[in-house]
Amino acid sequence: PPPHPIAAAARALRGMALARAFVVLSSAAAVLSEAVTPVEKVVELLEKLEAKIQQEGKEEAAAYDKYACFCKEQVDEKQYNIERSDKKIEKLTSQIDKLGAEITALDIEVGDLSKKITDLEQESKEAQDERDHEHAGYKEKADDAARAIDACKRAIAALKESKASLKGKAQLEGEALA
């Protein structure tokens, strides 16, 4: 990752502080005294400032590294979730297409079967009408046949009765001729 702006600024300040310290030390070397001079105090303050800046730079760099690591983890996790979702979308889209094709095929089959049912119902109605017509014809013929049989029975009975009366007449005629 690119260097953190704060770390770069800390390095720049450290470089300037060292340059100033060098200037101060070279002028302090000319004046040697046992007491702490203002220049020595400045040098000491600059050294403390340098140490503080270096420590803050290390802390900032550690915080930046931690944040960069967190960002990378988040990016990786999001990328994984996106890839997983894309695969799921692809799978579901494929399943939707497959089921859509099945629905279309079943709709066609339902239409064909509905037409067959309608045709069979029409054929059944026509066959029922024909059977009803045939039944009516049969009933009429059966009634005619029953009336004819009844008429024949009555005719036979009448013939038997007339035969008996004819038998008596034939005997009378036979006796009269004899």
Image (cartoon, helix red, strand yellow):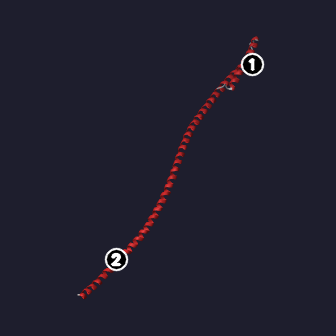
Q: Nearer the viewer, residue 127 or 80?
A: 127
Q: Position of residue 30 (x, y in %)?
A: 76, 11
User: Quadrant of residue 52 in the image?
Assistant: top right
Tell me if residue 88 comes above or below residue 173 in the rendering: above
Front-lying residue, 19 or 129: 129
Residue designated by label 2: 153
The answer to whether residue 141 is seen in the rendering is yes
**Residue 78 locus on image (x, y percent):** 60, 35
Q: Can the viewer see residue 44?
A: no
Q: Quadrant of residue 5?
A: top right
**144 left or right, relative to 24:** left
Query: Mark 2: which secondary structure?
Result: helix
Q: Is residue 17 placed above or below 177 in the rendered structure?
A: above
Question: Dot 2 surroundings within 10 Å: few (below 14), some, or many (20 or more)?
Answer: few
**Which residue appears at 30% of the width and 81% of the height?**
163
Left or right of 176? Residue 39 is right
Q: Residue 35: horizontal and vertical position, in percent?
A: 75, 14
Of the numbered discs in the image, which one, if any, rests on residue 42?
A: 1
Residue 45 lies, in percent from the top left, at 72, 20
The answer to whether residue 126 is above or below residue 32 is below
Q: Nearer the viewer, residue 119 or 56?
A: 119
For numbered disc 1, what is the local secondary structure?
helix
Looking at the rendering, in which quadrant would you find the C terminus?
bottom left
Q: CA distance from mark 2 to mark 1?
A: 158 Å
